[in-house]
Image (spheres, rainbow, N blue to C red):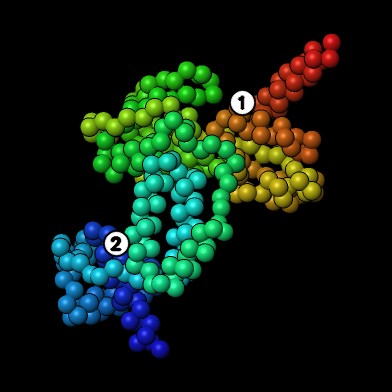
Amino acid sequence: MESVNRFDRIVAILVQLQSKRVVKAQELADRFQISLRTVYRDIRSLETAGVPIVSEAGVGYSIMEGYRLPPVMFTQEEAASFVAAQKLMQNFTDKTLGKHYETAMYKIKSVLRGKEKDWVESLEKHIRFFPTQEIFNPNVANAMEIILSSIAEQQQIFLKYTSIQIDHAVDRVIEPVGIFNENNFWYVLAYCHLRKDYRQFRTDRIQAIKRTEIPFEKKHSSLEELRSKDARTKLKVKIIVDKTIAKFLGNKKNYGLIDKKSVAKGIEMTFLVDDLDNGFARWYLMYGDFAQILEPPELKERMRYLLNKQLNQLKNSTD
């Protein structure tokens, strides 16, 4: 049984070597949960079988340029995952990137055996995703493609961008660090030359986007590091929610939720938020009759303002 497992692992290692320009031995050890010594042994087995592997101490392994193998065959289960991913790409990315993935899917399907092709075709008709809102501006069909190219090529991009506070589009030149999905929206974390600092840009608010050939002026930390630093500057919010409604608010990422625990009066929830005025406070309005604000005082003041404003509007509408 060990020889079969080792064979499967060596084939998987070969596939991974083909998927990247350089693969570190530690990456292989972590993925397959094996020792570095076993990685070295498996690499030697591939070399003995005639695979031209280039190794460089302290860098990693790569396959010699120009070496190609016949198309990899996929299992039914792997093909099914591609179908689900295709539906996600079509509905949760911009039109251009979705089209690119569709083209890639044709290439993937071309290497499937006959019965797998039939199996995949039958699945395609029964998988659908329905976004709850527009997550890309339909008039900017290639936003994601340009953003990803900018990150890979380290070149600045030009945006026309609107925000909640400003109705008209403002020109921005940015250096994108990464993209992430949060609360059902796509965001670009980038260094903004207008603000001279890092900012988040929501993709549905991008009114125009253009490539440039201007290289990045700064060396940026990773997306994870910048997001972690950003979290330390956010405002902490604590509320107690009635247990009957808490289960509907329990998504770990919704509006910056970082912790929740059961207390005598219900479920205490802790959030880290960017914006009390337009984001969290308006979301809280939907559940405020089932909740109590513990901190900060600024949130209580904001809620009083919003509720009084609504009350005055209702009074005026009945006069």
Q: Which residue is denoted by mark 1 in the rendering?
A: 277
In the picture provided, is 245 more to the left or to the right than 119? right
Residue 301, x across and y down, in percent: 70, 23
How many C-alpha atoms fall within 10 Å of the one at disc 2: few (<14), some, or many (≥20)? few
The amino acid on which the numbered mark 1 sits, given as a three-letter code, is Asp
Q: In this figure, what is the number of numbered marks?
A: 2
Which quadrant of the figure contains the N terminus? bottom left
Q: Is residue 6 above or below residue 171?
A: below
Q: Which residue lies at the image location 69% right of the left edge and 34% below the top edge?
A: 284
Q: Which residue lies at the image location 42% right of the left edge and 46% below the top edge?
A: 98
Q: Nearer the viewer, residue 319 or 251?
A: 319
Q: Is residue 71 above or below residue 274?
A: below
Q: Which residue lies at the image location 25% right of the left edge and 41% below the top edge?
A: 153
Q: Nearer the viewer, residue 11 or 242?
A: 11
Residue 50 quadrant: bottom left
Q: Nearer the viewer, residue 313 or 288?
A: 313
Instruction: Return the mark for residue 235.
Output: none
Q: Which residue is denoted by mark 2 in the rendering?
A: 19
Residue 10, x across and y down, in percent: 30, 76
The amino acid on which the numbered mark 2 sits, given as a three-letter code, is Ser
SS at mark 2 in the image = helix
Residue 48 quadrant: bottom left
View extreme (top): residue? 319
